[in-house]
């Protein structure tokens, strides 16, 4: 049995795909920028002995890394789910 979602069933689906793609790009760019900023702040704060700021920037770095991983992996996960649905 060949089960596959009908992506043309809704009007304006092409515009929705463009908006989602633009938002995904925006999220990934911001996450990478925050990753860089948090890493720099962590390094500077650790060098100057400011442990509270180093701890907060380390948390920011981990959150940015998780956000980038979830946003980047979301497309691959959705494609995998569609492929699995085709095999059911």
Image: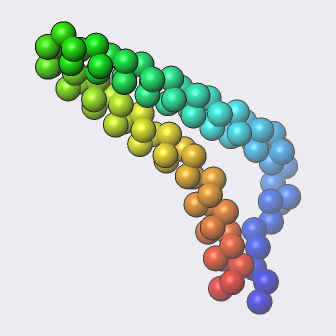
Spot occupied by residue 73 in the image (x, y as percentages of width and height): 55, 52
- The answer to whether any part of residue 53 appears in the image is no
Q: Nearer the viewer, residue 23 or 12?
A: 23
Task: Name the outermost residue toward the bottom.
Answer: 1
Horizontal side of residue 19 vs 13, given as left or right: left
Does residue 86 sit above or below 80 in this rendering? below
Q: Nearer the viewer, residue 5 or 23?
A: 23
Location of residue 2 by image quarter: bottom right
| Total marks in image | 0
Picture residue at 63% right of the left edge, 67% below the top: 80
Residue 72, compared with residue 81, is above or below; it is above
Quarter of image, res 42: top left
Q: Quadrant of the C terminus?
A: bottom right
Above or below, 44 relative to 72: above
Viewer-proximal residue among 23 and 51? 51
Q: Is residue 78 visible?
A: yes
- Between 47 and 4, the one nearer to me in the picture: 47
Residue appearing at x 14%, y 13% in the figure: 49
80 relative to 45 in the view: left or right: right
Against 41, residue 7 (above or below) is below
Residue, x 77% and y 89% (percent of image)? 1
**Residue 71 percent coordinates (x, y):** 54, 44
Point out the residue furthest to the top here.
48
- Where's residue 57, x and y in %? 29, 23
- In the image as oriented, which residue stretches furthest toward the front? 47
- Classify residue 77 as left or right of residue 4: left
| Image position, residue 51 (x, y; %) | 14, 19
């Amino acid at each position: 049995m060949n089960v596959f979602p009908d992506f043309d069933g809704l009007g304006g689906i092409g515009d929705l795909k463009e908006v989602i793609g633009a938002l995904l790009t925006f999220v990934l760019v911001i996450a990478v920028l925050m990753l860089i900023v948090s890493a720099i702040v962590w390094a500077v704060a650790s060098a100057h002995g400011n442990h509270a700021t180093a701890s907060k920037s380390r948390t920011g770095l981990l959150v940015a890394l998780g956000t980038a991983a979830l946003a980047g992996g979301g497309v691959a996960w959705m494609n995998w789910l569609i492929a699995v649905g085709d095999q059911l």
